[in-house]
């Protein structure tokens, strides 16, 4: 009984120490160091002008929904790119409803991109990401959208291909992991490209 | 060579290369030898012990160890319930998230105290920042508990004939401050400088380039994500866990997080070798475990890189593999790698949605949790493996007609009974839980539980109980478990039982064996540090687990695979 009593007191006091140290001190030190990171640990941001010309910002690492024909599309998302939450579709590989949905996404893609062959559509453009906030697509997924965007924006396909190539993020140290393109950065550059073209025409 | 494959090989080699020196360090910590962190932490620990009126040199026997362990865990449980059920009006709640319901608070507290981190809530909306900090505390101390238990067993294996086996609080605090904290700190700093938020500012509202208004959850994420990986906890800051681009922003952070998932679990095996000065024994254990991991790892990577056969039939380009539920920056190979590493250990964080993996990958993921001892959770993984060693010692003893002995101690009826009860507990909890939920969904087919029909729906339920009983915490997240009292209570019960009995059992066996008379090795001794015995242990694991779970797996993933 005496052992239990001292035990409970010791355990409670030690728990209090742990609360102070692991909730408080550890968190505070990491937070303090985070003040030296980009945007003080509040998430890396990037500025852009939206269609009415006002300056806004977004998060580099949080994907945005791009569904308009004039932009490079991002991947399908089960969270609709609203980063107040995050989720995948959690559809099983053999679920018949899910497979129908994938087929419908392929068909929609083909309608909007009539020059693209079905066998060239990369799988990530018709499947939802794990977070629903995937900021990336593969270089190939961007390339097959070039024809559509060239037509809508009246820019040459060569210029667009160059733009895509310039935005390919290489694997880690050139050796590890897949190549990818940040869709938000690419589309910001795309908007800027259009405005410089218009400027040069005016001159 | 494919850069996705090289990435996976990098992670594998780097992990083992780091685990060996780190194991040596852990052995020193538990043996009480000098380490380079002494100047900092000696004072901190002394201060803790003075405030708590603990004498860290007062040794305990195995029963006292267990009583102490259970008492402090009970206090944590009560504290956690209290905080989570009142978080709405407590400080640090900028997003105004509600308090948890009693059943959800029960599930969450048990989940985090038991090192499981099954999450029946979503981080963005279900907990306040204070709640997240409390959960972060549990991620340290629950991992520390498991490691303290394994330190007691190490101590028991070392002594020739002993009753006293060190001080629990000493092992516990040292595990937290000397082992978990330094790595967590390094990982947190790497995350912070690669894009993971660490702020107390609430949700941000932004206008997207296309003109949509969206919200972005932030928070003090980096510190929690680090310990969630290092302590085999797995509970993420955001709902999508490490698939979330703020929780795991780059391929580099993925490598770092993935290494830290399994680093301590592997290092503890080497630590055993250094601590007992039996390197061959450690190599035997490492060999069995790593072969087991590779048997799951290789086919899973192949399956996921090959992609979903049903989508292949639609005629699109599937060179990227099975991408449903996966992120482009990580790719299918690194996602498959993570899925196995996180389930052979009891981590349970995910960087891709397991529910959408191809059927056979789903089976290997579940098998990792069903065995739960190929490295396993920090500390507890070795305790589970210890049970298999005891069973293997006993069976091989009977086979060659000698008294079963392990490290100079006779294994007798009492130890064997405990070992068998602990082994049988895992299949009992998983299978009866799955049977119960299958029955409930059979009589109430309208319940919104299953996100997928048929065999895959059954797999979702089987996975949930497997994950709970293995203290893993990952899920086939399509399962509608979030607002459900049924899942909160049943999974909470399973996690509770499957956490503490498998700690009590091995510590009791080790304590009982430590008290017995030491028998010096002779020509008749069964040698534990040989390849033959390694094969024996592997065979025992394979046969026992196959017998326990094959039928359930046949109804789920195997049936799904063959029915396409």
Image: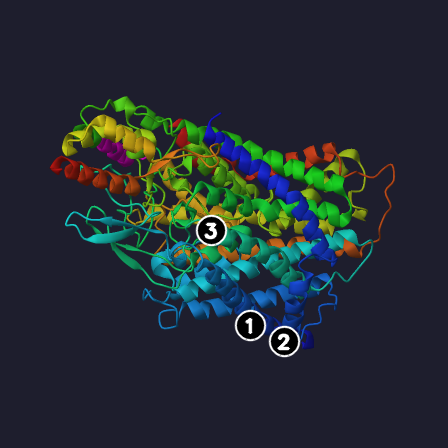
- Residues at discs 3 and 2 in contact (Cβ within 8 Å): no
Residue B498 showing in the rendered view: no
Vertical placement of B383 versus B361: above or below?
below
| First in residue order: circle 3 vs circle 2 | 2
What is the x, y in percent for residue B437? Answer: 40, 49
In the displayed structure, would residue B54 be above or below residue B212? below
Which element is circle 1 on? Answer: helix
Looking at the rendering, the stretch of residues picked out in magenta corresponds to A95-106
Find out whether the residues at labels 1 and 3 contact each other: C-beta distance under 8 Å: no
Q: Which residue is mark 1?
A: A16
Label 2 element class: helix
Crowd class of label 2 (few under 14; some 14 to 19; many from 20; radius 10 Å): some
For the C terminus of chain A, give its image quadrant. top left
Horizontal arrangement in the rendering, residue B556 relative to residue A67 (left or right): right
SS category of the residue bearing label 3: helix
User: Which residue is tagged 2?
Assistant: B51
Q: Cα distance, mark 1 to mark 2? A: 10 Å
- Image check: B450 left or right of B80? left
**Residue at point 60%, 44% (across, down):** B373
Callout 3: chain: B
Q: Quadrant of the N terminus of chain A?
A: bottom right
Residue topped by disc 3: B191
């Amino acid at each position: 009984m005496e052992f239990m009593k001292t035990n409970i007191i010791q355990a409670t006091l030690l728990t209090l120490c742990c609360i102070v140290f692991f909730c408080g001190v550890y968190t505070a030190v990491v937070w303090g160091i985070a003040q030296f990171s980009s945007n003080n640990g509040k998430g890396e941001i990037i500025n852009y002008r939206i269609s009415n010309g006002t300056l806004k910002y977004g998060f580099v690492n949080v994907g945005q929904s791009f569904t308009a024909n004039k932009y490079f599309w991002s991947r399908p998302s089960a969270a609709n790119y609203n980063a107040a939450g995050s989720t995948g579709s959690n559809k099983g590989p053999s679920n018949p409803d899910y497979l129908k949905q994938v087929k419908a996404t392929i068909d929609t893609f083909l309608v909007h991109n009539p020059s693209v062959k079905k066998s060239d559509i990369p799988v990530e453009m018709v499947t939802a990401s794990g977070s629903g906030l995937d900021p990336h697509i593969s270089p190939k997924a961007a390339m097959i959208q070039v024809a559509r965007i060239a037509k809508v924006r009246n820019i040459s396909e060569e210029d667009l291909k160059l733009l895509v190539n310039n935005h390919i993020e290489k694997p880690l140290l050139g050796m590890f992991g897949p190549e990818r393109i940040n869709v938000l950065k690419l589309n910001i550059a795309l908007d800027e490209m259009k405005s410089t073209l218009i400027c040069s025409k005016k001159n | 060579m494919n850069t996705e494959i090289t990435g996976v090989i990098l992670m594998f080699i780097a992990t083992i290369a780091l685990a060996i020196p780190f194991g040596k360090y852990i052995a020193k910590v538990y043996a009480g030898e000098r380490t380079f962190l002494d100047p900092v932490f000696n004072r901190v620990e002394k201060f803790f012990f003075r405030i708590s009126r603990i004498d860290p040199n007062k040794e305990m026997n195995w029963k006292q160890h267990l009583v102490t362990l259970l008492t402090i865990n009970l206090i944590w449980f009560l504290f956690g319930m209290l905080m989570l059920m009142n978080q709405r009006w407590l400080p640090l709640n900028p997003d105004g998230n509600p308090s948890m319901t009693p059943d959800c608070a029960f599930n969450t507290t048990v989940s985090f105290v038991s090192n499981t981190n099954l999450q029946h809530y979503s981080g963005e909306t279900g907990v306040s920042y204070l709640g997240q900090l409390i959960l972060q505390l549990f991620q340290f101390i629950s991992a520390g508990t498991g490691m303290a238990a394994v330190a007691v067993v190490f101590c028991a294996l070392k002594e020739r004939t002993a009753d006293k086996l060190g001080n629990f609080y000493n092992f516990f605090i040292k595990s937290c401050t000397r082992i978990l904290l330094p790595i967590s700190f390094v990982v947190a700093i790497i995350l912070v400088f690669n894009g993971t938020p660490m702020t107390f500012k609430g949700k941000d509202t932004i206008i997207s380039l296309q003109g949509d208004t969206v919200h972005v959850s932030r928070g003090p994420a980096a510190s929690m994500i680090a310990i969630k990986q290092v302590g085999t906890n797995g509970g993420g800051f955001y709902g999508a866990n490490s698939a979330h681009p703020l929780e795991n922003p780059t391929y580099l952070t993925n490598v770092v997080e993935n290494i830290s998932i399994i680093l301590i679990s592997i290092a503890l095996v080497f630590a055993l070798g250094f601590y007992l000065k039996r390197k061959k024994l450690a190599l035997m254990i490492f060999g069995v475990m790593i072969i087991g991991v590779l048997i799951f790892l290789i086919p899973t990577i192949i399956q996921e890189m090959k992609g979903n056969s049903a989508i292949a039939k639609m005629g699109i380009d599937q060179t990227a593999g099975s991408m449903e539920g996966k992120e482009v920056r990580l790719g299918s190979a690194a996602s498959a790698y993570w899925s196995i590493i996180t389930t052979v250990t009891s981590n349970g964080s995910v960087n891709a949605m397991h529910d959408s993996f191809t059927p056979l990958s789903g089976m290997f993921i579940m098998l990792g949790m069903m065995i739960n001892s190929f490295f396993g959770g920090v500390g507890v993984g070795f305790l589970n493996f210890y049970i298999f060693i005891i069973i293997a010692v006993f069976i091989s003893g009977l086979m060659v007609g000698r008294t079963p002995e392990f490290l100079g101690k006779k294994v007798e009826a009492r130890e064997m009974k405990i070992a068998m009860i602990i082994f049988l507990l895992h299949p009992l909890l998983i299978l009866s839980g799955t049977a119960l939920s299958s029955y409930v969904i059979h009589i109430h087919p309208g319940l919104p539980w299953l996100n997928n029909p048929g065999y895959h729906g059954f797999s979702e339920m089987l996975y949930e109980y497997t994950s709970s009983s293995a203290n893993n915490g990952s899920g086939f997240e399509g399962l509608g478990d979030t607002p459900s009292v049924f899942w909160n209570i049943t999974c909470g019960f399973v996690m509770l039982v499957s956490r503490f009995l498998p700690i009590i059992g091995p510590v009791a066996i080790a304590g009982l064996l430590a008290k017995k008379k030491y028998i010096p090795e002779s020509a008749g001794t069964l040698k534990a540090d040989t390849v033959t015995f390694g094969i024996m242990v592997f065979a025992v694991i394979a046969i026992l687990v196959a017998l326990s779970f094959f039928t359930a797996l046949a109804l789920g993933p195997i049936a799904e695979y063959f029915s396409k």
